[in-house]
Image: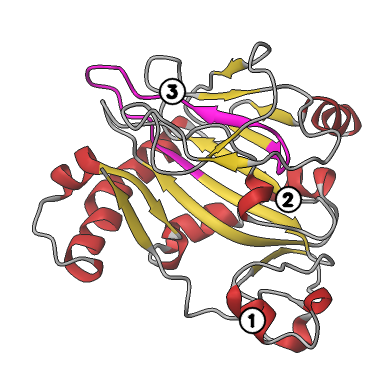
Amino acid sequence: MSSIKQCYEKDGYYIARNLFSDSLCNRLNLHIKSQVLSQFVLEKTTEPGSDTAMMDTTLCVHQPHAVSDEILKIMKHENVKSYLAGLIGQCVKGVQSMLFIKGPGLQGQAWHQDEYYIPTRDRSLCGVWLALDDAIIENGCLWVIKGSHQKGYLYPMKDHKEPENFDRSKCAFGFSEASEIPVQLKRGDALFFNGYLLHRSKKNVSKNLFRRALVFHYMNSYSLLPWGKESFENAESSGYADNRRIIQVLGEDPYAWKGTISDDWDPHLRRY
């Protein structure tokens, strides 16, 4: 694990090949289409449509673990935890899940750092990007800038001018893109990446390839999470702001005395 952590600290990411079996990925993809998306049609939206129509128009499901025990199991899977222990430490909490569908023609996301959206107190944020399909250049794999995490600098953000290529999220700027490289993954591979790593994904330009992926975010349990308005409203000072909408996945929760928020994850769709 020491060489893995050295690679992670140097480059800002590490690829765990074959972290999950092909059969498990197939089972998850079937579950996503027949149950997760259908549940949103029936319960979370007022829009008519079939699970197939949802597949074609949904870019992302936010917090799918809140409506799927199968996805929650993957979030806490031993294969994932074994890497998190070496990269973050022995006490790790999960703070977010995302399910990307990204069918043909759907946009990518412009340059960003995940720490911009999920601030941590100790720079321990780690994203885990699990490929449920082969992620290649044609269907919109991730692109990264190696080592861009090392200074711990959050780049400014602005609106981009390419709505046909990228979703509505803002774009980081103030750096050179010349050294970007694609991170192409086989189904079952997982990318572990630092919260300060600059990365983006491009449009799915394929004719018939989906780019399904589960993405989870984790951090050191000892770090407070100043994320969301309520975390500041309930704090005696800004330094104590701490969002307790978390899932403990490894080791102890040193702030267990605060309780957790388990029924307010706000799962929702991002569609285009």
Seen in the picture, residue 185 relative to 29 is either above or below; the reply is above
Q: Nearer the viewer, residue 158 or 60?
A: 158
User: In the shown orientation, is residue 228 left or right of residue 70?
Assistant: right
* Distance between the alpha carbons at the discs numbered 1 and 3: 36 Å
Q: Position of residue 267 (x, y in %)?
A: 39, 65
For mark 3, give the secondary structure: loop
Q: Is residue 212 magenta?
A: yes
**Going from the N terminus, do you reach mark 3 or mark 2 first?**
2
Q: Residues within 10 Å of mark 2 (few under 14, many from 20)?
A: many
Circle on res. 86: none
Identify residue type, mark 1. Answer: Thr
Q: Which stretch did the figure color magenta?
A: 193-214
Q: Which residue is mark 1?
A: 260
Q: What colour scheme does the image use?
A: secondary structure
Residue 125 — which label?
A: 2
Residue lying at the far top of the rendered structure? 178
Q: Give the answer, above or below, for where 257 lies relative to 83.
A: below
Front label number (1 vs 3):
1
Judge whether residue 41 can be spotted in this image: yes
Measured as percent of width and height from the top left, residue 256 is found at 76, 82
Separation (CA) of disc 1 from disc 2: 19 Å
The mark found on residue 134 in the picture is 3
CB within 8 Å, label 1 to label 3: no
